[in-house]
Image: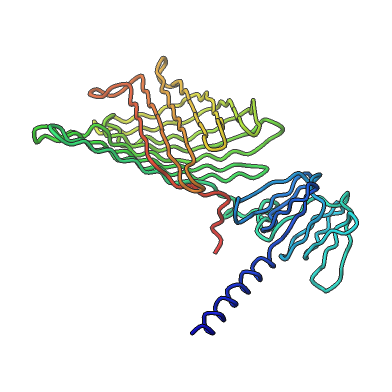
Amino acid sequence: MKTLKTVVILLFMGLMLVANGLADEIKLKNGDRLTGKIVKSDGKALTIKTDYAGDVTVSAEAITEISSDQQLYFALSDGKTLTGKVETKAGRYEVAVRDGGTIEVEPAKLQAIRSQSEQEAHERLLKPRWVDLWNGGLDFGYNLTTGNTRTNTIALGSNLSRQTRRDKTSLYAAYINAKNKTKGVTETTANAIRGGGRYEIGISGRLSAFGFADFEYNEIQLLDLRSVLGGGLGYTVVKNDRTQFQVFGGGAYNKENFSTGLKRNTAEILVGEDLSLRLSDRVLFKERMQFFPNLSEKGEYRITFDSSLNTRLTRWLTWQVTASNRYLSNPVAGSKNNDLLFTTGVGITFTNFSFRK
């Protein structure tokens, strides 16, 4: 039995040594060493994924040596890409390429280092297919109170977006239902479904063109279906890592069917703005307001407002608070002008997702 325990311990220690030996390593000027898996480098900084601290980014100037046990991709200034394991000697990169040879690379000729997954993502960005580069999320909110009055609210939401260097596609859908039960009588206080999409393509510099389609059902506003098709031009006022702000304008065609039997077809002007503000690494605020003056009925208009505050709890889990408003200057008899909704709940997010098999 003692012999068996000894063998098991030795095997375990051997596996640990092998696992450690398979790690990439970088040495720093201050004598420290970091082990893990090299993720990427742009020549100015290097990111390595460690078991104990996650992703760690180090300035390239602080690194003295690099060695890898995984195949890395080296993008050179002449457009070529080398693939192999690397070690640094005498200030140069020695890449052991797959055919068994070794190629020396001067640091000045190196544009980027990428792991296998980073290289695949880079290639998808250069020549993306429609199924690549998707970001999005699913949100769920529920509220229940009980006692003399019973109320329950359920809210569901989803969004998808795909952005390349040239264009951007956005899709969304939302559902909310709220009921209030008092003395055995149930009243629906909210029941709405919204969905649509928007496609935007860059023209030059900050100027872009877009087209969109929105569809909406709202029981409280007696709206069976509102279908809006439109397009226009947008101008990006601010665009940096923290803030993106765009103003836009154009036109739209609005077709409305109400449960009262009323049908309306109108032409509209569109004026709006779109703001995305990253308050911190974990908190993102988004807001969009659109104003639709009615060209078919003078003096009439409608306004849509949507905002959300997302707090990232984990890599994929978020906490979200949303507020949306739909204002109609000429509602049908029996409904109010304003329809304001607040929801809160949790959601899941995904980034750089591909629908490829």
**Residue 218 versus residue 40 in the image, above or below:** above
Q: Where residue 319 sits in the image (x, y, percent)?
A: 43, 39
Q: Where residue 32 sits in the image (x, y, percent)?
A: 74, 51
Left or right: 99 with respect to 40? right
At horizontal 72% and vertical 46% (from top left) the residue drawn is 58
Quarter of the image for the C terminus: give it: bottom right
Q: Nearer the viewer, residue 9 or 60?
A: 9
Q: Quadrant of residue 102?
A: bottom right
Q: Quadrant of residue 260?
A: top left
Q: Nearer the viewer, residue 211 or 352?
A: 352
Q: Residue furthest top?
A: 299
**Residue 128 versus residue 218 in the image, above or below:** below
Report the colour scheme: rainbow
Left or right: 285 with respect to 71? left
At horizontal 42% and vertical 22% (from top left) the residue drawn is 296
Q: Where residue 128 sits in the image (x, y, percent)?
A: 65, 53
